[in-house]
Amino acid sequence: MHYLELISGPLIGAIIGYFTNYIAVKMLFRPLKPVKIGNFTLPFTPGVIPKRKDKLAQTMGIAVGQNLFTKQDVQELFQKESIRHSVINGISDKIEQEINSTIEELISKFAAQETVEQKKADIVDLLTVKIKNGILELNLGNLIAEGGSAAIKEKFQGGMMAMLLNDDLIASLAEPIGREVEKYIEVNGTEIFQPVVEKQMEEVLSTNTKAALNVIGVDIEKIKVALNQAYDALICENIESILNHFDIAGTVQKKVEEMDVVQLEKLVLSVMKKELDVVVNLGALIGFVIGILNIFV
């Protein structure tokens, strides 16, 4: 019986220490909401973290934004050569995939098919009108007179007809013809030119984008050079200005505030479960030691 009395003190101390620390750890998160008896709210409810969640979010935001992941860290990250290569190669690979399609297929990826068809029709109408108006502005009578006079003179050079067909006579014949042609174009020009323009438009849109770029001397290597220059201009030279619009602390604070308390608990326990278990076990150890000391006091 004497030995039972000796061991009971340390065991009871260990049990009390264990459960005291276990409850203390649990009270970090539980209960999730205040516990009320009538109008009276029980002390220590809700748990420490649910009760101080807003303050915790603010503190975590400041800690991350000002100490753990600063704007300077972001700037150095974007200026790393490995990041540059990753971004440039990723974009250029995507471009290379896209430019193997036709021009129309490429346009269709960025706009609805109905929009593409409407824009095609609008462009055809615009070009048709421009061509028609351009021809009407040429003064066909004069052009026919000048061209016809030169051709007739060359054909009948040195003969009697060359003497009879002078410039005035040719002009008097050509100008009425030119006016009739202009009237015909003014009335029927749209029907004449629109099918031609539509055919040319279809040929252009069905052209392979890569082939079209090669015509003007653009290939993927030149695109990569341009992307590197753009990266330097937009990122390396202006990164500080860009980061002034970043609120890392505010973003972290908002994310923590929006996080459910149960999720937050799981997050903390996934990182600190071993440490919290050590705290609980340490309570048992301290209770056991105090129980032993009481034997000798």
Image: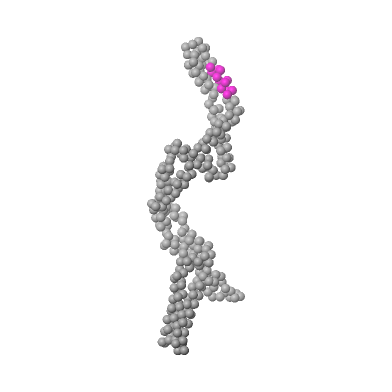
Q: Compared with residue 210, is residue 62 higher up or lower down, i.e. above or below?
A: below
Give the colour scheme of this rendering. one colour
Residue 172 part of the magenta segment: yes
Q: Quadrant of residue 114?
A: top right
Task: Identify the residue at image location x=50%, y=66%.
Answer: 266
The picture quadrant where one finds residue 74 is bottom left
Q: Quadrant of residue 3?
A: bottom left
Number of labels in the image equals 0
**Which residue is at a point 54% across and 36% down the rendered structure image?**
202
Taking depth in this image into account, of 154 and 211 the one nearest to the observer is 211
Q: Which residues are magenta?
A: 170-181
- Residue 119: x %, y % from top left: 56, 39
Q: Position of residue 10 (x, y in %)?
A: 45, 83
Magenta portion: prevailing SS class: helix
Residue drawn 57% across and 20% down?
176
Residue under the point 56% across and 20% down: 175
Residue 36: give x, y in percent of width and height: 58, 74
Q: State the quadrant of the C terminus.
A: bottom left
Camera-side residue of 269 and 116? 269
Magenta span includes 272? no
Q: Is residue 61 above or below residue 190?
A: below
Q: Position of residue 231 (x, y in %)?
A: 42, 48
The reply to whether residue 54 is visible in this rendering is no
Query: Image height check: is 215 above or below 44?
Result: above
